[in-house]
């Protein structure tokens, strides 16, 4: 089984480098255009089901893609973006100043330490893989499945499959509208990463790289 992981299209908060987290921010015009290009890229795929985060930036991305695929969309709250608590709506450059003391503790134990009022990467990993496990259990007859989610969710899934510490998530990027692919071997019961952050469906000179989650 092949599982496509697509990050939602761009939002105004991405453009402003603000952390979105669990805030329900909608796509901007560029984000919708990105979703259209992802849909065109996947038009000839064998995707049998789309699983989407409940947040509108992901769900709208899934709906636009589905114009090219025409299948069922299953909404899953467990693949919504990481809850960043007090940091949501703030820019990382400002967080580094305002929360300098807390960040020292956070970076020391980034897997288990939550953001103030938010959740930890361990929390995120647990709920994200509950959906991954549901998919491989419930979609055994599907050749391909699509997940539309968020940057931190996709990075957490990929790091886990690659047996990397979550602190390594900053060693690779997951851009808006990017496509990563993993494969599940039913006989062996293991996931394998096939590709990460594929943006070949975009025109490079018009592609902006925004990392704010």
Image (cartoon, rainbow, N blue to C red):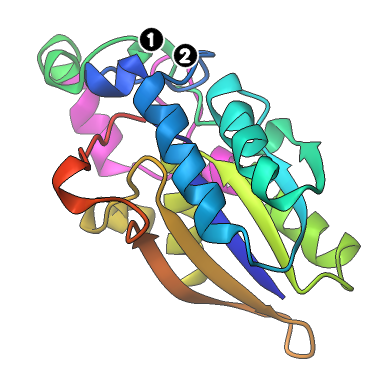
Q: Give left or right: position of 130 versus 202.
A: right
Residue matched to label 2: 117
Element at badge 1? Answer: helix
Quarter of the image where one finds residue 159? bottom left
Q: Is residue 93 magenta?
A: no
How far from the left and from the top, in percent, is residue 27? 46, 21
Q: Is residue 163 visible?
A: no
Q: Which mark is residue 110?
A: none
| Disc 1 and disc 2 in contact, CB within 8 angstroms | yes
Q: Residue furthest bottom?
A: 187
Image quarter hosting the C terminus: top left
Q: Position of residue 138 (x, y in %)?
A: 89, 61
- SS assignment at label 2: loop
Q: Quadrant of the N terminus?
A: bottom right
Q: Nearer the viewer, residue 116 or 79?
A: 79
The magenta segment: 101-126
In-front residue for pair 110/38:
38
Residue 197 is situated, as x and y percent measured from the top left of the image, at: 36, 58
Left or right of 174 in this view: 97: left
Q: Residue at x 32, y 53 (%)?
A: 169
**Residue 144 spot, x, y in % from top left:** 71, 68
Spatial CA distance of label 1 from label 2 is: 6 Å
123 inside magenta stretch: yes
Residue picked out by circle 1: 86
Q: Earlier in the sequence, mark 1 or mark 2?
A: 1
Q: Residue at x 29, y 33 (%)?
A: 106
């Amino acid at each position: 089984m092949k599982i496509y992981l697509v990050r939602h299209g761009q939002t105004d908060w991405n453009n402003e480098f603000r952390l979105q987290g669990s805030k329900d921010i909608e796509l901007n015009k560029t984000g919708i255009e990105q979703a259209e290009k992802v849909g065109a890229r996947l038009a000839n795929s064998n995707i049998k089901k789309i699983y989407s985060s409940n947040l509108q930036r992901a769900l709208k991305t899934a709906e636009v893609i589905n114009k090219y695929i025409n299948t069922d969309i299953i909404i899953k709250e467990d693949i919504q973006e990481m809850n960043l608590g007090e940091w949501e709506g703030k820019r990382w450059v400002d967080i580094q100043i305002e929360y300098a003391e807390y960040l020292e503790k956070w970076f020391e134990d980034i897997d288990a330490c939550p953001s103030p009022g938010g959740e930890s990467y361990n929390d995120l990993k647990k709920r994200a893989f509950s959906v991954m496990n549901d998919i491989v259990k419930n979609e055994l007859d599907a050749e391909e499945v699509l997940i539309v989610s968020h940057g931190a969710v996709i990075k957490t899934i990929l790091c886990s499959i690659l047996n990397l510490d979550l602190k390594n998530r900053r060693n690779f990027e997951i851009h808006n509208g990017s496509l990563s692919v993993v494969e599940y071997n039913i006989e062996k019961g293991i996931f394998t990463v096939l590709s990460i952050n594929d943006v070949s469906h975009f025109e490079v000179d018009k592609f902006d790289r925004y990392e704010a989650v």
